[in-house]
Amino acid sequence: MAETVADKVLEETLRFRAALPGLLKEHPGKWVVFKDGAVQSIHETEEEAYTAGLAAFGRDGGHVVTPVMPDNAAPITAGVLFNVA
């Protein structure tokens, strides 16, 4: 069964999160195109990174365009999100 684009993006996202501590030391505050477990290009803005990723890998390239910032995500339940808890 062929891997979907969503599967590829999820895999790259997990790889990016694993690499984030080192990337924060090397490229803090920058935007990156991340694919195959590595930074493919570094940019000052989201638009520059998006354009570069699209040019290099196309719409369905399975790459990730993301800022190099600390991951401050706070998982919450649907009950909290929709105020039903």
Image (tube, grey):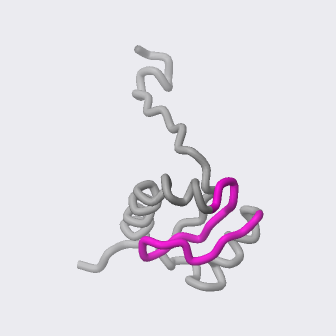
**For residue 66, above or below residue 41:** above
Q: Residue furthest left?
A: 1
The residue positioned 61% from the left and 55% from the top of the image is 68
The front one of 24 and 60 is 24
Q: Position of residue 21 (x, y in %)?
A: 49, 52
Secondary structure mostly taken by the magenta-highlighted segment of the chain:
strand
Give the extent of the magenta segment.
27-44
**For residue 18, above or below residue 77:** below
Residue 37 sits inside the magenta stretch:
yes
- Count of marks, rendered view: 0
Quarter of the view holding residue 41? bottom right
The residue positioned 56% from the left and 77% from the top of the image is 40
Quadrant of the frame with the C terminus: top left
Residue 57 sits inside the magenta stretch:
no
* Side of 21 relative to 47 (left or right): left
The residue positioned 37% from the left and 72% from the top of the image is 4
Q: Position of residue 43 (x, y in %)?
A: 72, 69
The front one of 27 and 2 is 27
The front one of 24 and 52 is 24
Quadrant of the frame with the N terminus: bottom left
**For residue 30, above or below residue 41:** above
**For residue 24, above or below residue 83:** below
